[in-house]
Image (cartoon, rainbow, N blue to C red):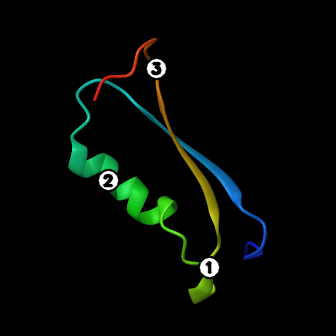
Amino acid sequence: MLKTGSPTNVAVALSDGVAPFESGIFYEVFGIDQHRQGLPTYDFAVCAAGAAARS
């Protein structure tokens, strides 16, 4: 079990063609701070394989 005071690094690498809903699941699990409920904290980042980000 992780300590609630020490965040764990989590990075999600996305590629072209990933559906927004599926990538949103990672945010729901790792991106929302829920330490007040006694759950572990995460330092969450989204990464891309390409040189330029598109939105």
Residue at which label 1 appears: 35
Q: Amino acid at mark 2?
A: Gly
Q: Tell me which amino acid carries mark 3.
A: Ala
| Mark linked to residue 52 | none
Q: Give the mark toward the camera: 3 or 1.
A: 1
Q: Residue at x 64, y 68 (%)?
A: 41
Crowd band around label 2 with a 10 angstrom C-alpha radius: few (<14), some (14–19), many (20+): few
- What secondary structure is found at the residue carrying circle 3? loop
Q: Tag count in the figure?
A: 3
Where does label 3 land, which residue? Answer: 49
- State the separation of the CA atoms marked 3 and 2: 18 Å
Residue 30, image x, y percentages: 51, 60
**Residue 49 placement (x, y as % from top left):** 46, 20
Q: CA distance from mark 1 to mark 2?
A: 20 Å
- Point out the tag, 3 or 1, that comes first from the N-terminus: 1
Q: CA gap, disc 3 to disc 1?
A: 30 Å
Where is residue 2? Give x, y as percent: 74, 72
Q: Earlier in the sequence, mark 3 or mark 2?
A: 2
Task: In the displayed orientation, state which residue is furthest to the top.
Answer: 51
Q: What type is the residue that disc 1 sits on? A: His
Helix, strand or loop status at disc 1: helix
Give the numbered dot on residue 24.
Answer: 2
What residue lies at 77% left-to-right and 75% top-to-bottom? 3
Left or right: 14 as drawn, with respect to 9: left
Callout 1 touching callout 2 (CB < 8 Å): no
Q: Which element type, helix, strand or loop, lies under badge 2?
A: helix
Q: Is residue 45 above or below residue 2?
A: above
Relative to 38, is 3 on the left or the right? right
